[in-house]
Structure formats: C-alpha cells, structure tokens
Amino acid sequence: MTTGEGRTTDWETVIGLEVHCELKTATKLFCGCRNQFGDEPNTNVCPVCLGLPGSLPVVNAQAVELAIRVGLALRCDVRPSIFHRKNYFYPDMPKDYQVSQYDEPINVDGWLDLPNGTRIGIERAHMEEDTGKSTHVGGTGRIADATHSLVDYNRAGVPLVEIVSRPDLRSAEDAKAYVSELRAILVAIGASDGRMEEGSLRVDANVSLRPRGTEEYGTRCEIKNLNSLRSVARAIDYEVARQAAERHAGSRIVQETRHWNEGEGRTSSLRSKEEAYDYRYFPEPDLVPLAPSDAWVAAVRQTLPVLPAERRASLGATVGAEPASEMVVTAVDRGVDRLVLDAVGAGADGRIALNRAVNDLPADAFIELDTFVALVGLEAGGGLTPTQSKRVLEVAVARNGGDPAAIAAELGLEAMGDDMVAAALDELIAAHPEDFADYVSGNDKVAGKFVGLVMKSTGGKANGRVVTQLLRDRRAAGQGQGQDQALSP
Amino acid sequence: MTQPAGALGLAGEVRAGSRTARSVVEGCLSAIDAREQELHAFNVVLAEEALARADALDRLVAEGVDPGPLAGMPVALKDNLCTRGIATTCSSKMLQGWRPPYDATVVTRLAAAGAIAIGKTNLDEFAMGSSTENSAFGPTCNPRDPSRVPGGSSGGSAAAVGAGFALLGVGSDTGGSIRQPAALCGVVGAKPTYGAVSRYGLVAFASSLDQIGPLALNVADAAALLEVMGGHDPMDSTSLDRPSPRLSEQLEDGVQGLRVGVVKEFVELEGLAADVAGRVTAAAAALDKAGATVDQVSVPATVHGLSAYYLIAPAECSSNLARYDGVRYGYRHAGSRDITEMYGRTRANGFGPEVKRRIMLGTYALSAGYYDAYYGQAQRVRTLIVRDFEAAYERFDVLLGPTTPTVAFPLGAKTHDPLAMYLSDVYTIPSNLAGHPAVSVPFGTGQDDLPVGVQVLAPALGEPVMFRAAAVLEASL
Amino acid sequence: MTERLTRTDVAHVARLARLDLTEEEIGTFTGQLAAVLDHAADVAALDTAGVSPTSHALALSNVLRADVPRPSLDRHEVLAMAPEAEDGRFRVPRILGQAP
Ligand SMILES: [Mg+2]
Ligand SMILES: [Zn+2]
C-alpha cells in the first residue's frame, strides 16, 4: 500500500508498546526446568510446566528479583502484587490459562528517556509466564494453510516481564529508539540477553491515528510479532499508512489484533471472526501474594549498574560529543565507554579514543588501558596515521597487549614527515593540473581525490589531515595572497 | 483407647514383628474379594503390588528396621491422587488410562511411613459430587446398605474403610467430600486446616478449598494418618511452613473445661432430619458430661456458605479443568478438522454431566459483566464467614454440629436434582470457605440403623483440640 | 439482580468453555444453572460494601524457591502420554488463528 505524503501528515501517530522480555534466569518461573533457548523440543519440561494434573507452581525468587531490577531501572514503584489467571484456550499454553499479573502488578508508573530526550511513560512492568511454541506443518508452513501443528513446551513457563509503555510514542523512529533503549537497559541490568532473534524480546505495538492538534485517542490496532528493531519500524510505518488510507477512504478503523508478516511486509487480521475472547481473570489460588520487603527492594537498588542514558551523558560530556550521537550511543551499547573514559582520564584524546574504541576494537576484545592510552597518544601526536593506528590496535589485541610504538616500528609503520608528504602531494598536483585548477576554483570535492592519491602513493603512511591542510595551503597560494577562503574544517 | 481393629494397633504389631504386613494385606484382599463386586469402592486394586510391598516391609522388620508408624497398613487412595506409573483417572473418561510420571507428596509420605497402597478408589468425577454416583465408571455403594449412596466425593475411600478393604483411607475435601461420606459410611473423616497437607499431586478441583485428609475406623488412626501426611512441602506454595501437628500425644487429654458451641444455624436449618438432630443433641450431652461447657452459638454468615461455595468452587474448577483439552495427555476425540472442533468434542465427550454443569456455572460466574456480582461477591461473603467464625472462636474452643442433614440416601434419589444434591454439603462447606479444620465422628445410628456423623469444627490449626473432642465423643459411645 | 439466564447465554458460555454441548444439554443446563443462580441470589443481594474479598484462607506471602535447576522429565515418558506426537512434539489439528 502506498500513501502520498499529504495523506499521512494530516494525522498524528500515537503508539504504545508492550515489550515481553524473557528474564535471564537459570530456571523457569514456576518450576526447576531449565530456561534455555535452542534445546531439543520437550526436553525441558516437568509436571508443572506441562500443566499435568495435580502439579502446582512455586515462584522463582530470582525471577522476582530480576523483575524488581527492571522496575527500578525504569523508575517504577515496586509494589505488593498478586498473580491472576488469564483464561483462554490455545495449544501452546499447557494449562489453558496464563499466570500473569493483572490489576496488581509488581511495577507501576515509571519512565524511560529516549536518547533524544523524549520521556516515555511506563504504565507497568508485570510478571507472567511464557507460552510454548507451535510449528505449523503442511502448506506453506504458515498458520493459515497448515494441515496440523506441532507443539514444543520448552519455552512454556519461562519467566517474562511485560513492559507496557504509555501511548507517548509519536513515530516509528521513536518506537524503534524506545525498543533499542529498553533493550540496552535490560541487558545492562542483567535481566535479558537482549537476543531479539531468539525471541528474548518480543514487541507488540498499539497504533492509532488522530487528527493533528486533537487530544482524543483514535481507535487502535495491536500489531503482534515484531521480533526485530527493523520490523518494529516497518510494521508501524505500514500500519500508519494503512490506517491513514482507511480513514481517508472514509472507513472506520476496527479495533483488532493484527499480525505482522515480515516476508510480505504487511499486517493482517488473523483472528477468527466468531471468536469472542473473555479472559475471565481471577486471582491464582495456587499462589500467594508477592510483597517484596523494602529491604529487598533497597538491596536490589544497591546493585543496579549505571544505566545507559547516564553513561551516554558522561561519555558525551567527556569527549565533547552529543550524548545521542551515533558514536556515543554505539560506545555505550558495545560497553566500551568505560575504556574511553579511563583513557581520557589518563590524558588521551577523547575523540580519537572514542573513534578507535567504537570502530576498531572487535566485540568482546580486551585491551589494557595503558596500551590503549599509548596508542591514542601516538595517533594524536601524528606519530601514526589513523590507518596505521587501526593496524597497530589490531595487532595489539591479537597479541593481548604490547607497546604500540614497538609494534608500529616492527610493522614498519610510522607517519611520514610533513616534508615528504608535501613532496608527494606536489608531485601529484603536477601530474593532475586540471584537477588542481578545478579545486582552486572552488570545487572542494576534488580534495578527496588528492588525499586518496597521496595515500596510495605513500602506502598509507601519510596523515590525511596533513594532506588536507597542505592542499589548502597550495590553493591559497594558487589564488594569490590575501584572498581568504572560507573552507570547511 | 486404640481399638484392636484399628490401624495403629496392627501397625504396632507389624513393627514388633508379632504380625506380618502380608497377613494384614491378605486380610484386606479377602474382604475385597468378598464384597468389592457388590460395592465398587475401587477403580483399581493393587493386589500384587501391595503383597510385594508387604513382603518387603516384613523383610525390613526381620532385619531390625522400623518401617514407620503405619507399617504394613493398607491404605485406599482416592483416585485423584497422582501415583507414579499407576493409572490416575479421577473417575473420568478424560483421564482414563493416564499414568502420572510422578507421585503426589502424600503418596510419597505414606510410603515413607510404611503404609501400603492397596488401590485407587472411586469418586465423583474430578471430586464433584456428594454421592459417588457421578463416576464415569459407575457408582460406589454404601457398605452399611448397598442400596444407598456412600456419600461423596470420597465415597470409594469411605466405603473401602467402612467395608474393611483397607485400614486407612485418603480423601480430598473441597466442600465436605471427606466428612460427608465418612458420616454416611460410619467412619471417621477429617478435613485439616487449609495448607496443613500438601496438595502437590492432588488433581485440583477448587484450589482455594481443596484439602487432603484422612479416613479411618477410629479417631486415633485418623490423627496418626494426618500426622504422617501433614507438614510443609516446598512444592506447594499454599503449604503452611510448619511441622505436622502432634495430635496423638494430646488425644486422650479430654475436654475438661473446653468450651463447645453448638452452631445455631446448623441445628435450626430446615431440612435437618430429626434422627440426625437427635444425635447432635446426644453428642452435646456427651461432651457436657465429659466436663466441657456446652452452649449454643450463632455463626450467621454460614447460611450463605452453600451459595458462595457454588459460585467459588465452579469458578476455580472451570479454570482448573481447562487443561483437559486433548493435546498433552488423556482422552482426545478423534477425527476433528481443526483444533477448536477437537477441543469442543473432546471436552463434551470426555466430561460427565456434573463436571460440565460446574464448568458452565463457573465460566459464567467469571465472565465479563458477572464477575463482580457472582465471584467477587462470593469472595466477600467468604470474608463474612471468616469473621463470624472468628467471633465465635473468641467464646468457644470448638464448634459442634451435624455433618450431613440426613443419613445415607438411596442411590438415584438426587441425581436429577443438582440443588438437592448440593444441599448434602450445607454443614461441611463453611469450614472449607474459612480454611478451618473439621472432623466427622460416627455417633450412633439414625433412621434404618444407618450411621450418623457429628462434626467438630475448630479454628485454623485447631486440630489438636478438635481431635481431643472427637476422641471423647468416640469413647462416650 | 441480573436478568434470567437464557439459552443464548448458555450457548455463549459453552463456547467460552470449549464444550460442544447438544441442543438438549443447552436446554437442561439453562434451567439448572438458573436454579443455582436463583439460589445464589441471597448472596448477590447481600450488602458487602467495605468488605474485602477473601481469595485465600491463608495469610501467607512471598513463598519463593531458589533458582536452581531440577531434573526435567524424560521426553519419551512425556510424549508417551500424548494422544498424538510427531518429531519430538505434541501434534494437534490445524489451529485456526494466532494466539490472542
Ligand atoms: Mg501479557
Ligand atoms: Zn518444568
């Protein structure tokens, strides 16, 4: 479906997200079976998580603790709570009810700031159990034309926290940023492994439109099955366009659940029409209330790490970059912010340190602070070009350390003296007179070509910044003295 | 005070080596041979297993090992208690042939105390009923008069104990399912405090009301059986974190100075038969004579117990029985085109009428728009009942009343009138709603020489005083 | 307190409960459920303002277990219970819609 821009801009998009986060516990929520992705089907099951007659649930203390961590990280009130049963029939649910928190959830009323500063309200973050997994067999392997289905209960009973945002998001981009930020927090506090591709985080989006400038919420549709950041954005974009088109065509939006099909790039209504859902919630009589003591909550709070937003702020301030900039966000995401901060503390150049840490330090690689500081120092002092610096870093990591200067010498890497760079440049200017004239007359794009040619002729030993500066000098000379050019740095 | 025929005396002889467990089991098996065809107390008799286990216990005794307080005692297990590798059916077509991969906690504890499972007993399907006529496998008959019901839902266990098929019986009591059949069969039956006995492995009917309890020929045996089964179980979140009560030690302490309240609402209820009422009066007199102070007490909210119960229990049952859907175990209706059809047909064919009736009632009581008026309101009434009991227990140590309104009624008498059947539990239900213990003690006979049970009620964890009063009643006969 | 139960109500409840009842059963249950609900009218009519519900006779809270793995069941034993199994999993007829 395509929509002209004129059609969607009349509407404001209102999005609320429900994120199901599988908690990183050793065992399931109500039994001692392993909480383990990818095992052989139906090997992590017992009377409790299979819902065998006579079995009873007992709550996993660690799941509660992680749920409290989630609540505290999202600035929620942690409250006494009770579990309810949500009754509906579905083959991946062993008891044909889901144990979930309903009107008395453990965490309520918090917030999360997007990197761009927008504050998104968190309505609640409650505990519940996961369902098993169905595989559809026959036809195209999709539910609609399958001949039968096969069910694996390994996932049934895995602890979840369902984090429900307020409808404070206004675009697919915001939604994506929200999920990304939430994921970073959940990983940072040890609640989740963050693996969306394994279903560790699953997103449902409530999307509605309202005429711009109005306050009342429009009829919303709930989109299920958003299992990557990309599908969150794509599905919302699709749904916004669909709803706008419907409304322009004069149709009413029907409140319904829609399923996102990643392959087809569309949402569709798949709920069988005759089906009326009435969950008949009532307090789970097999469990007793959960009332985390103040002491417990305080102890959990003590162990919370610094959260990504704060880490981005301090890294940004330290290196002189926007906290929301891609480099800073990535540094915190990758967990290299501590290294950069420590390097700066030891006198290293912040920008260079950030650059190397984010772009050139392989994931999970370890490097001694001293080695890193020395490397950044060499590059900052012009002793190594950025290209050389990356190479030295690579070797240092592979060797688990070493003196960068010694490694550079061993590899025959050291930045060329400015005189030699100038000589190489002048030679190239002579060989390409028309290009140089073009540059002198104001075509800055040609500068890049000269930098590339110099790098090539010097085997990467020239410092790009030096080449650029020399070029500017030559142009100034070519244009005659006193003529000031406003060149971009 | 232990009668020679009782389990404790026999177990003592087995432990001492003066009687073999085999001979005890053989005694029960021959009683079963003689009358089981007529009474149908069991869904399965575990004759060979029981004899093998008896022999093993006898060898232990010969080696000088004490098999435990219930050494060699044949116990009849209600067939809603999970037994590893042994069919557990709940007397339902839905679970016919299902063999649990685990034992209920009480089954494990009984074995550890030396008891021998002699069979799985018949019950009203999924424990829903008061006559054991709602069994998919046919009714059980009352050993005192086989033309009459044994009560229910633990009718099989009560009949088995009453007929001498087993020395001990285990039942479950959600609204009177141990006490009512105990009364009708002339045996002792107790429902402990909610949380006193682990429910792990008891197939749930109404989780907030279900409790496992003992059936026995006498009070001392019932107390000993409860001691063995009780105590904290980490597998049940609603299990009380305390040791099993020590009942036997205090059993003979008497009732001197005990304050006994006869529940006014119970004895004034229209529908209480005169013969039963007479036995309650006699029981009050017996306690008085033994030194207790007896007075009447009003527990007003109990009159709403039956109504509240028939909203709460079906509501919980509608959810607890959702899992019988033909996917993972038990019965599945074959040949369905899709899963919705499979669910609908499996459940329609797998459940009997009473179970369906209660699932329907409970689903309705929980459904949108009715929750507050029915389920929510019933839970508030439950609070009122708890409060009124609390007030009564400020002035009284135990309460006294009938267990059932009448003696055992003829088979088929109430099967077409659910409400009339439900009224059989009018005196037992309030204790379940309050989570309090209560025991039914045989106290003579009424019409047609049929047994009458009187009920002693106690506050939460009041089992010691409750059993003391029960023992005095028993001894006064 | 509420209007009398109708056949339509009972049919709806049967669908919710996944019970394929016969027309005759729906008729019988309509009468019987109405009788029980009539009996419950005294409860429904009670003034319980300010009375909080008791969902449990217990005063327990925070019953928790340690996050320590326990042995799971043997898969053969698990699938042996299944009415139909295939490929290590429970086989069911085709499912008509996504989970709610
Ligand atoms: Mg949920
Ligand atoms: Zn499990």
Image: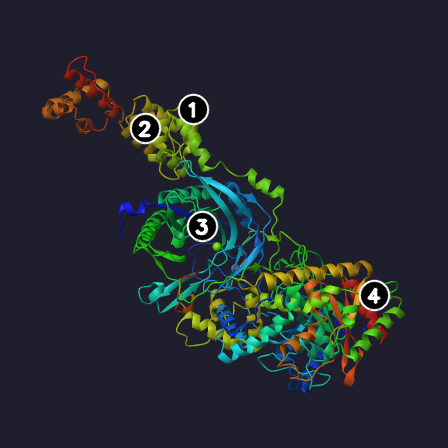
Which residue is most to the top? A482
Q: For this view, does B474 lie left or right of residue B328?
A: right
Lower sequence index among marks 2 and 3: 3
Classify mark 1: residues with Cα within 10 Å, few (<14), some (14-19) or many (20+): few
- Judge if badges 4 and 3 mark residues of a common chain: no
The residue beneath circle 1 is A346
Name the chain under label 1.
A
Name the chain under label 4.
B
The residue at 59%/61% (across/down) is: B372
Instruction: List x then y, in percent, for residue B453.
Output: 77, 75
Amino acid tagged 2: Ile
Q: Are marks 4 and 3 in contact (CB under 8 Å)?
A: no
The residue beneath circle 2 is A407
Q: Marks 3/1: CA distance?
A: 43 Å
- Judge if badges 2 and 4 mark residues of a common chain: no
Lower sequence index among marks 1 and 2: 1
Q: For this view, does B245 lie left or right of residue A238?
A: right
Label 2 element class: helix
- The answer to whether any part of residue B119 appears in the image is no
Q: Are marks 1 and 4 in contact (CB under 8 Å)?
A: no
The residue beneath circle 4 is B260
Q: Marks 1/2: CA distance?
A: 21 Å
Q: For this view, does A390 lie left or right of residue B274?
A: left
Q: Do the residues labelled 2 and 3 touch (CB within 8 Å)?
A: no
Lower sequence index among marks 3 and 1: 3
Amino acid tagged 3: Glu
The residue beneath circle 3 is A18
> In this rendering, is residue B61 above or below A189?
below
Some atom of ligand 1 lies within 8 Å of the CB belonging to the residue at label 3:
yes
Q: Marks 2/3: CA distance?
A: 51 Å
> What count of labels does the image hold?
4
The quarter holding residue A450 reads: top left
